[in-house]
Amino acid sequence: MVAAGLSLIFGVTRIVNFAHGSLYMLGLYVAYTLVGAMGHSGLGFWASLLLAGAVIGVLGALIEVLLLRRIYRSPELFQLLATFALVLIFNDMALWLWGAEDLLGPRAPGLEGAIKVFEYYVPTYDIFLVFLGPLVLVLLWLLLTRTRWGTFVRAATQDREMLGALGVNQALLFTSVFALGAFLAGLGGAFQIPRTPANLGVDIPVVVDAFVIVVVGGMGSIPGAYVAALIIAELKAICVALGTVNVFGVDFAFPRLTLVVEFIFMALVLIVRPWGLLGRSQTGAVRSEPIGSPLRPASFGLRLWLGLLVVFIWLVPLALPHHPVLALMLLDIAIAALFALSLHFMMGPGGMPSFGHAAFYGLGAYAAALLLKLAGVPMVWSILLAPLVAGLGALVVGWFCVRLSGVYLAMLTLAAAQIIWSIVYQWDDLTGGSNGILGLWPPQWLDGVAYYYLATGLVIVAAVFMRRILFSPFGWAMRACRDSAVRAEALGIDVKRIQWAAFVLSGMFAGLAGALFAFSKGSIDPDAASIGKSVDALVIVLLGGIQTLSGPLVGAGVFHVLEDYFMGATRYWHAWFGGVILLLVLVAPSGVVGLMQNLRHRWRS
């Protein structure tokens, strides 16, 4: 149900709704509340579930009317940023309304028992859900193929502009589609209330699984979403059923694959059939950056400001006796800025969106840690060698990714990141598993202020090097491939090779940032390669502005300052942080740097 709603929304509005998992989470909470208010009897229970879905559907309609309708003309990744802000807001809203405890609803009346299937007992409610899935699929199919509204929806997935030219009210159609998609997400959450407790941590895993199902099935294909959900669920069940299997004296624990089997399957499907099992071939599903004016060398004023910033960073240690936290905060900002610059390198000038850039950040961090701990390599050499390991990983992943584009490329990077995260999370003997690797402090001669200078110096050198690359012939070729791959190929440019090289370079810079992070914190854990770390980098890039080279630098500063301020000011800091991001998206769709440039131009005028 959740994936069908997400597929429906994307097929018509082209919005990658990151808040879809939050609607599922709110469906759980609202169903719990309504069941408690309307009673546990048969009529009251089932009416509560349907009413919960309807409430979330109304919420979805309000989201579309009040927020998304204002940013349809913005780049699609900024729409993604707006829905991410909603994730933060809804999470804290649920915390405020229902608290942090898990809330498990009552059993479904009339379906409390179990049915014996062969040698196993299967809960009756689970059997009910098994038949509910095909029923929802049939009802959606009838709605989309046998009604006038469904005809409009199918037409919108093909050509929205032509549909508007024929006089169809697109605004009303988009609102109704988003409301239906939200209703399905909320209903999916509501029907889980007898099986899964409502809690604040279900939103992100659910939306990631839904994205995987939608991409595997084909963006915009409802039957594809059903088939993909069925296959992925069966693959997980098979992994559990196989247990530990001994092959040639080596034990393979298949249940561990349940953490990553859907991403492995998605990667295989995208490599063989890039548009999904039942999807249609399409390009440009996600536009990372619109074609804009060419990059220009930095003006004298900008160079002066950047020079003053470097001087300020390097003079900060002199103020350590009075402001000991300032140097630590600046070091975190500098490392985050390098990570964001590496992502911007491939997303902005390279035109390749990524939802899994933390894969190379984590590879660099773990490579540096293992070189120091296991191989006995000095810390400085570990930092310098870590980007090569991350670059090797990017070389392998990039070979597959550059054959795709848009959201399919982004999802393949997410699959690679989740596979790498699963390896470091479960390989206890090498990576320390969930505990990570501890004791990564710099040697005595490089401790404290010396490491601050080393790390910030490497960040500055890497940033300047990336800028030099972008103004080289290779950088011009990158932007040519981004703006028009057909014209670039006609000029004799090997588009895939240029994009592959850009992918590898981006991964190397991300690996350097990961290595610096590991030694700055003294430890590293699987969170360095998690989805959350990738999302942080994406938010930083979009906050600063993807159209400008200085955007990631400004975005890193804004992101960390806001996060540190709100985290210390209130328990509900996620909501305040999300509210500020939402305000920036509405007021400055080109990012903070774009807003500053617009204000400067107006002042001059």
Image (tube, grey):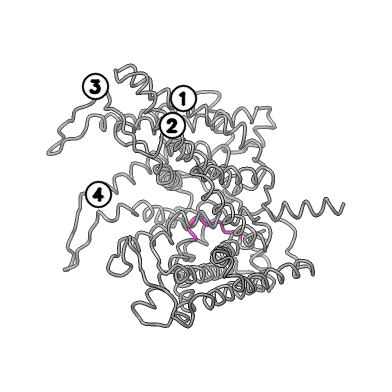
Q: What are the residue bounds of the magenta stretch?
A: 351-357
Earlier along the polypeptide chain: callout 2 or callout 1?
1
Earlier along the polypeptide chain: callout 4 or callout 3?
3
- Give the CA separation, mark 1 to mark 3: 23 Å
- On the image, the x and y values in percent for residue 483 come to 67, 58
Mark 1–mark 3 CB contact (< 8 Å)? no
The kind of secondary structure element at disc 3 is loop
> Of the residues tagged 4 and 1, which is closer to the observer?
1
Q: Is residue 416 visible?
A: no
Q: Nearer the viewer, residue 326 or 493?
A: 326
Q: Which residue is mark 3?
A: 110
Amino acid type assigned to the residue bearing label 2 in the image? Gly
Q: Residue at x 49, y 80 (%)?
A: 446
- Give the CA separation, mark 4 to mark 2: 29 Å
Earlier along the polypeptide chain: callout 1 or callout 3?
1
Amino acid type assigned to the residue bearing label 3 in the image? Gly
Which residue is most to the right? 605
* Label placed on residue 54: 1
Residue 354 painted magenta = yes
> Of the residues tagged 4 and 2, which is closer to the observer?
2
Earlier along the polypeptide chain: callout 4 or callout 1?
1
The kind of secondary structure element at disc 2 is helix
Q: Nearer the viewer, residue 357 or 31?
A: 31
Mark 2–mark 1 CB contact (< 8 Å)? yes
Residue 560 painted magenta = no
Q: Residue at x 57, y 62 (%)?
A: 340
Quadrant in the rendering for residue 69:
top right
